[in-house]
Amino acid sequence: MSTVIYWFSGSGNSYHVAKALQESLEDVELVPVAQAVKGGIQLSSKTGLVFPVYAWGPPVIVSKFIEKLPSDKSDYLFAVATCGGAPGSTMAITRKMLKRRGLDLSASFTVKMVGNYPPMGGAPAEEEQLKVNDTAEGKITEIVSRIDNNACGDFGKKSFIFSLMGPMAYHFFTRALSKQKSSKFYADDKCTSCDICAKICPVDNVEMADGKPTWGNRCEQCFACFHWCPQESVQYGRKTLEQVRYHHPGTLLKDMLNRQEIE
């Protein structure tokens, strides 16, 4: 049974999960959501979506991707969401979006990984990161086993309160994102003009001008530019100056690049 897994990731958490699935299952192709949403989306006999939780829902780019999915049936359609806290109503929203495309979600999973959203304080210290990632590995192994055996059902944690609050929080997040002009992003004096921030942006929202990055109005709030800057030069307002940068230790820069290799 061939498998295609569409993934979206900023810090590399979700990519790590997608890669673990590829390494453990047979005949798996990994496709970036940011690439697929531009065209050429296909469902396989087994199809997966792997993405982070944003405001208790899927990233906007994942929503756009789902809206473009063909109505062809997949024998087994699964979704895995990574989150730093509670998944909220992420899978309920995802399932509803898929239903509108005539697709049924066979199985859904959530796995807690290192939270790293800068507006909410960013990533914890390295010691805490190691603890969270170590626990996550056991969960990922469990998810792999279930998917390999075509298990069906919702295997994520549920909370009545978060289920009620999730859709509202997600609605306000997506509305705010539509008005986001990326005005809080800037590169400080540590910037060496390496342009990694521009190359790693999944939606080409960062461009170099006179050797410095500039941000447009298509930001997906993945903060890949922030976490992967080797000089920790990318900032978001003034509160990030002392924040811990994070990317999953099992994910390499070359895994995340959207357009080209960096030597």
Image: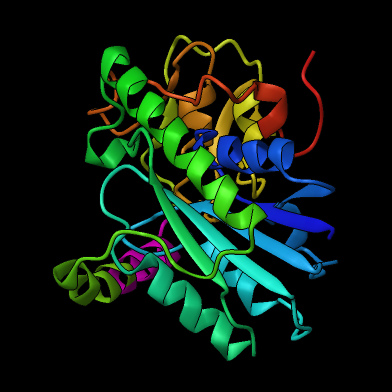
In-image side of 40 versus 237 (left or right): right
Residue 65 visible in image: no
Q: Quadrant of residue 179?
A: bottom left
**Viewer-proximal residue among 232 and 190:** 232
Q: Position of residue 189 (x, y in %)?
A: 44, 11
Q: Position of residue 92 (x, y in %)?
A: 39, 75
Residue 165 visible in image: yes
Q: Quadrant of residue 162?
A: bottom left
Image quadrant holding the N terminus, namely bottom right
The colour style of the image is rainbow
Report the residue that reaches farthest toward the front: 149
Q: Is residue 54 magenta?
A: no
Image quadrant holding the C terminus, namely top right
Residue ID at (50%, 26%): 248
Q: Is residue 174 magenta?
A: yes
Residue ID at (57%, 22%): 250
In-image side of 213 versus 43 (left or right): left
Residue ID at (68%, 70%): 76
Q: Position of residue 121 (x, y in %)?
A: 22, 33
In-image side of 179 versus 2 (left or right): left
Picture layout, residue 22 above or below residue 151: above
Give the residues in magenta: 171-180
Q: Position of residue 60 (x, y in %)?
A: 50, 64
How many numbered markers are drawn? Answer: 0
Residue ID at (72%, 35%): 23
From the image, give the main secondary structure of the stretch colored magenta.
Answer: helix
Picture layout, residue 120 above or below residue 64: above
